[in-house]
Amino acid sequence: MAQKLTKRSEDYSKWYNELVVRADLAENSAVRGSMVIKPYGYAIWEKMQAELDRMFKETGHENAYFPLFIPKSFFSREASHVEGFAKECAVVTHYRLKNDDEGKGVVVDPDARLEEELIVRPTSETIIWDTYKNWIQSYRDLPLKINQWANVVRWEMRTRLFLRTAEFLWQEGHTAHANREEAIEEAETMLGIYSEFAENFMAIPVIQGLKTESERFAGAEETYCIEAMMQDGKALQAGTSHFLGQNFAKAFDVKYASKEGKEEYVWATSWGVSTRLMGALVMTHSDDQGLVLPPNLAPYQVVIVPIYKGQEQLDQISEKVNEIQGRLRAKGIRVKFDNRDTHKPGWKFAEYELKGVPLRIAMGPRDMENNTVELARRDTLTKEVVSVDSLEDQVASLLEEIQTNLLNKAKDFRESHSYTSDDWEDFKAKIEAGGFVWAHWDGSSETEEKIKAETKATIRCIPLDQQAEEGKCVYTGAPSKGRVIFAKAY
């Protein structure tokens, strides 16, 4: 295998970039700020996609697809929305190329300018709400619960694989409701689904909360979020759900006839997560040896590596492994048998350690004689020799144990890096050290901006389960009724 990864303690950013590339998750492409998601990385994304899609459909949502291009005029209909995305928009102005008259290559044909410029979608509220006005006429058409799996483009200046790229994959839900209460309930329900997914599948503990007014999604009345802590103490926003009120319904004239026959504007939500979750997965669990994947999302949960000399031994081991594979698969366990003769067992061990496969099984001639295998756990890097009898039950139990262990380890890390502070100098020192700092805030955007300017820390969220607590703003000393979470963030 190649040289070892940079240690996290030496350069966390470099460690992350090296790991994403060397574990075959993704690589930079020839297109500035964009990435190629490689098969192994995409397999993890597919697992995420499948579980989330199931959860969405179980709560009454359906999938659809809307255009990549959005007429420029649509953005001007919702003022705060266009203001929020204007600096990130890629714009299509022409529809044809031609050979340069001087033979210097291909140029844009000046005669092929679009009558109306098109925005490459940074998000789809505008095109979707223009469509919804044709789909919604009566209360009988509500609620309308649609989700879209798509790509979006936001012209980022500083990019990092998975965490911030010019183009990324995501899902975006867009729902319409007959009243305010139902829309708020939807936004909160979807936040709960994101939280459940993060904890039960990604093994990442998250805090559910509200964004401050200055951090809300452009065009939303309220933005709900889940916030996670990475191993360097920085926060990562892992998902958002927005209560849009009637802003987009009014902008696109989406009304419905109520049971009483009155025309009313509908109420809206939107919500989404993206391939940024891949970055969260890497940074929450992985170590200096490579990826550490939670079993619930690993493309294969078990890899079996034969140790042999000559074809005869390999044939004997393969026969036994085929039986073991069948028993594991009957238990619903995803398993791979790596019988390649192009690499030695030690090389394969290092490869699967780098790729974070939860369990590795090694079987050699002595194991065949003793009816045993060697089981190696990726999360603890421990090994044990176990009997092949009822191996499938032991593997299933270990996978559950690994999943739980990763979540508990992440919870313990967050707990040990969460602090309270009531003094400005103490606050600055704790922010600089990294972690979540729970502190009082006077509720003003001006104070929020000053704290950010002086410390680079933002208010990650106002926790939904926040307890009322009288206090004084850590910056201004003005009255406060509860603590919020500050942190530096990705």
Image (cartoon, grey):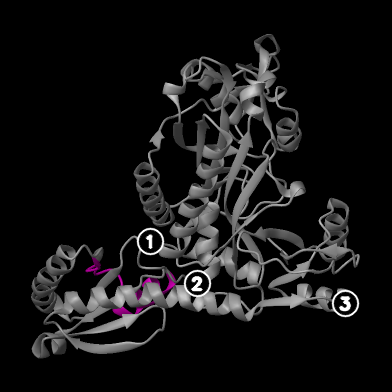
Query: Relative to 427, is 175 on the left or the right?
Result: left
Q: At 31% across and 72% down in the image, what residue appears?
A: 343
Return the residue at label 3: 425
Q: Which of marks 3 and 2 is nearer the N terminus?
A: 2
Q: What residue type is labelled 1?
A: Leu
Q: Which amino acid does label 2 sit on?
A: His
Say which element carries label 3: helix
When asked about the image quadrant of residue 487, the answer is: bottom right
Q: Where is residue 92 in the image (x, y as percent from the top left)?
A: 65, 23
Q: What residue type is labelled 3?
A: Glu
* Mark pair 3, 1: CA separation: 42 Å
Q: In this view, does 82 lie above or below 171?
A: above
In which quadrant of the rendered image does the N terminus lie? bottom left
Q: What stretch is highlighted in magenta?
A: 336-354
Return the residue at label 1: 297
Q: How many labels does the image show?
A: 3
Q: At 61% across and 40% down in the image, what residue appears?
A: 243
* Mark pair 3, 2: CA separation: 32 Å
When asked about the image quadrant of residue 329, the answer is: bottom left
Return the residue at label 2: 285
